Amino acid sequence: MPYTSNEILQTIRMVEMEALDIRTVTMGICLLDCSGPTVDQVANNVYEKIVRAAGNLVPVATEIESRYGIPIINKRIAITPISHVAAGCDGSDYVPIAQAIDRAAVQVGVNFVGGFSALVHKGFSVSDKKLIDSIPQAIAATERVNYSVSVGSTKAGINMDAVRRMAEIVQQTAQLTAEAGGIGCARLVVFCNMPEDNPFMAGAMHGVGEPERVINVGVSGPGVVRYALEKLGPEAPLTDVCNEIKRITYKITRAGELVGREAAQKLDCEFGIIDLSLAPTPAVGDSVADILEIIGVEKCGTHGTTAALAMLTDAVKKGGAMAATRVGGLSGAFIPVSEDAGMVAAVKAGALSLDKLEAMTSVCSVGLDMVAIPGDTPVDTIAGIIADEMAIGMINNKTTAARLIPVPGKGPGETVEFGGLLGTAIVQAVNPFSSTGFIRRGGTIPPPINSLKN
């Protein structure tokens, strides 16, 4: 459907008055042709391929920003999981490959590259183990590389050996970046039902079934949704609230598709998906928690919050799906605690706890995201938190993830400043009772009966 002049004028108003932006334009790049006999050769091949394939990404995105007046906050790259790319090379770790990716990111000017990843939901290959073992040192040695590991799926169940290993990796990463409050963990995420076309960090990767190069777009717009609901008023029934969210999400998604198609055409690559996720920032007025409070809960986290979030997520998907050629990624509503000013305020007020967040993740688009926990949290407790989140995804056949930050030297209620889009984190209390007996059994939690669909 062509874009009308009225749509363009409405989009301009949303940009100027309601904080609409395109959160990310992400280029997916296939690196399967970058294999080699040595780690150094793979690193060189990866660097050269990224620079060659994405050299014009930032200039093109900047040109589109100027042409349409729509801010594009992040320009990013997603790559083939490095555990696949490096599987045939020697060497005991993949840190040099991560460093090469980091240099390539600087060279082409993108904010982040995602895809230093492994998929181990059914078990570990030799390459998977090398990559996972490399993660803490690789994070400490890079600034723009993001790391993700798939440990479960509805079809495969949950690899509990991988869950515990990732808990160890999270703890090691926090210690290696202790001077900055464990901030390295902000670039590390553990997934169940990991999507292959996610444009958002830290979990972006370029799936094996994807084109050689593709443009995926992540839209935003919590401020736009908030503005629309404020105009609707507090007396409107929930049916009208849903319809208003669908209406405004349709407009947001149309703007994202316009940008994505324009970028793909100018970069001579395919247009992939729109990720509909409402992505908050620490800026006042750009909060998913604020939307839930406008819907009617006094403070995000109180009783009714999960129901309100479920309604919001569903309405966003319905409105966006009507506007987009192809919806993908995560799509719904993000609840990254430190990145959402309303979520931070809810934690400060005592309304939002780790347990309530876990319940909310059963209906939102991702999971426990940017959640700070005490730095002395035992590995098996971290593993238990991850396992709970993976179970929600496995049973409900949805993507869930855990991006946990054990903050060295900090305890419950204390604050750590990450700055920028990562915002402020308040350390949340964890259950004091042990998960060790459960976690140390190891093995696999079998897939649920609803996985048998063939």
Image: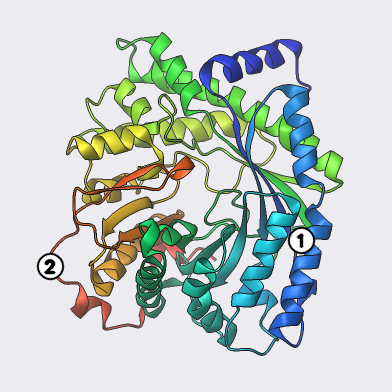
Three-letter residue code for mark 2: Phe
* Residue placed under numbered mark 2 in the picture: 433
Mark toward the start of the polypeptide (1 vs 2) = 1
Q: Provide residue 273's location: percent of width, then percent of height.
A: 67, 44
Residue at 31% from the left image edge and 54% from the top image edge: 372
Displayed quadrant of residue 294? top left
Residue at 59% from the left image edge and 16% from the top image edge: 16
Residue at 40% from the left image edge and 26% from the top image edge: 284
Q: Provide residue 415's location: percent of width, then percent of height.
A: 27, 47
Q: Secondary structure at mark 1?
A: helix
Image check: 59 left or right of 133? right
Q: Provide residue 385's location: percent of width, then percent of height.
A: 29, 63
Q: Which mark is residue 66?
A: none
Q: Quadrant of the C terminus?
A: bottom right
Image check: 375 left or right of 86? left
Displayed quadrant of residue 396? bottom left
Image position of 277 with respect to 284: above or below: below
Q: Provide residue 361's location: percent of width, then percent of height.
A: 35, 48
Q: Which mark is residue 50?
A: 1
* Disc 2 residue crowd, few under 14, some 14–19, many 20+, Cα 10 Å: few
Which residue, as the protein is rendered here, is positioned at the far left?
Answer: 433
* Disc 1 residue crowd, few under 14, some 14–19, many 20+, Cα 10 Å: many
Whether residue 395 appears in this view of the structure is no
Whether residue 38 appears in this view of the structure is yes
Image check: 385 left or right of 136? left
- Give the CA separation, mark 1 to mark 2: 46 Å
Image position of 24 with respect to 195: above or below: above
Three-letter residue code for mark 1: Ile
Q: Quadrant of the N terminus?
A: top right
Q: Between residues 302 and 110, which one lies in front from this camera angle? A: 110
